[in-house]
């Protein structure tokens, strides 16, 4: 009975998040405990012992307080009890963040490069660039995946773009193997650079499917037989003009783009829905994929595919503010954008 009540209680919080400018709720210990138990049921989660459960409950309670305080304010996005609700922001950073950008001295692209970029048909003419696009609706985006406790967001971000360009060119949407990239390319669960991942796929001649070489969220011995299957290939990759959100928009109008963002803040950790407009810097530490863009309520945004499962954000996606004054873009989204080329 308690589990049913808890599940109902937590479900109501997810379905009816606190509205903007509401008062901060005063929650009893009993209500918080019900929310916690319901959250555990919803995630089918348990702990090794009562001591660990008590520790996680206290963290959960602190995150809930933070969520309630934020949601009582006037914001364009709400926070919620997502999959990270029982970990501290320090644990979140240590476990899920770690991507490093390439050397600026090697890869910085100037504004003049966009003219050259247009010549390879990767960009539309300005007048033909649509005001919005969503590659999910166009059948080029696989379901949201979950990297787990492995610093493999780079693999998910890159393969999402490879899956997409393959679908755009062939009509076949095939989910590809992040595990192959972890085992056979990086060989560790550590942060990695996007351009080197594209280079591996090209030099290897392609990548296997996720069904054949499934993800395990840890490093295993490279299965060379599966590595040699090369189900989907690309011919090249390119970097979008940096610090130029218009260049990024016209690239994303043509296909999904892999980018790196700073996901360091607690608001990013506990994001539930809406357009993320909170402060974040440009010390990029997490790779994601732009799968479209649009505007709502006078605010432009990117549609971001994440790799932390569908119980975070908007079913695994996040709307990130677009066209801000900072040339780097919100959370540094315009600093290191890449896309694959398939002829």
Image (cartoon, grey):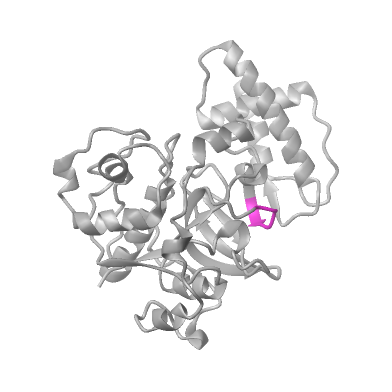
Above or below, comparing residue 38 to residue 189 in the picture: above
Give the quadrant of the N terminus: top right
Question: Residue at point 57% right, 31% down?
Answer: 91
- Magenta-colored span: 273-280
Question: Residue at point 80% right, 29% down?
Answer: 27
Question: Residue at point 50% right, 70% down?
Answer: 248
Does residue 271 appear in the picture of this structure?
Answer: yes
| The quarter of the displayed image where residue 160 is located | bottom left
State the residue lying farthest toward the front.
105
Residue 86 in the image: state x and y as whole percent.
61, 29
State the residue lying farthest toward the top.
50
Residue 68 in the image: state x and y as whole percent.
76, 39
Q: Is residue 77 magenta?
A: no
Residue 77 in the image: state x and y as whole percent.
69, 53
- On screen, residue 285 versus residue 157, left or right, reads right
| The quarter of the displayed image where residue 9 is located | top right
Does residue 83 appear in the picture of this structure?
Answer: no
State the residue lying farthest toward the right.
23
Above or below, comparing residue 82 to residue 3 in the picture: below
Give the quadrant of the C terminus: bottom left
The one of 206 and 197 positioned closer to us in this rendering: 197
- Label tally: 0
Question: Residue at point 76% right, 45% down?
Answer: 70
The one of 301 and 121 positioned closer to us in this rendering: 121
């Amino acid at each position: 009975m308690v589990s049913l009540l808890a599940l109902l209680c937590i479900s109501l919080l997810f379905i009816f998040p606190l509205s903007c400018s509401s008062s901060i709720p005063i929650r009893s210990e009993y209500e918080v405990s019900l929310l916690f138990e319901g959250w555990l049921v919803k995630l089918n989660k348990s702990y090794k012992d009562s001591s660990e459960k008590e520790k996680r409950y206290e963290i959960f309670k602190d995150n809930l307080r933070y969520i309630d305080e934020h949601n009582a304010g006037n914001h364009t996005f709400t926070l919620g009890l997502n999959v990270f609700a029982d970990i501290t922001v320090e644990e979140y950073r240590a476990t899920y963040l770690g991507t490093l950008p390439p050397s600026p001295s090697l890869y910085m692209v100037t504004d003049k490069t966009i003219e050259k970029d247009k010549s390879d048909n990767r960009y539309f003419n300005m007048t033909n660039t649509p005001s919005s696009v969503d590659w999910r609706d166009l059948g080029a985006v696989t379901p949201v995946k979950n990297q787990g406790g492995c610093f493999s967001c780079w693999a998910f971000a890159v393969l999402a773009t490879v899956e997409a360009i393959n679908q755009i060119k062939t009509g076949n949407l095939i989910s590809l193997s992040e595990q192959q990239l972890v085992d056979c390319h990086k060989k560790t669960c550590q942060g990695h650079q996007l351009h080197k991942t594209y280079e591996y796929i090209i030099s290897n001649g392609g990548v296997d499917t996720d069904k054949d070489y499934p993800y395990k969220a840890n490093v295993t011995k490279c299965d060379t037989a599966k590595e040699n299957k090369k189900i989907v290939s690309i011919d090249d990759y390119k970097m979008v003009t940096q610090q130029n959100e218009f260049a990024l928009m016209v690239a994303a109008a043509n296909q999904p783009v892999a980018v790196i963002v700073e996901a360091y803040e607690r608001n990013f950790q506990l994001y539930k829905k809406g357009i993320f407009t909170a402060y974040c810097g440009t010390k990029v530490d997490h790779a994601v994929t732009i799968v479209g863009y649009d505007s709502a309520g006078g605010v432009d945004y990117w549609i971001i595919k994440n790799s932390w499962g569908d119980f975070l954000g908007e079913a695994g996606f996040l709307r990130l503010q677009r066209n801000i004054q900072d040339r780097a873009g919100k959370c540094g989204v315009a600093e290191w954008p890449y896309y694959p080329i398939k002829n």
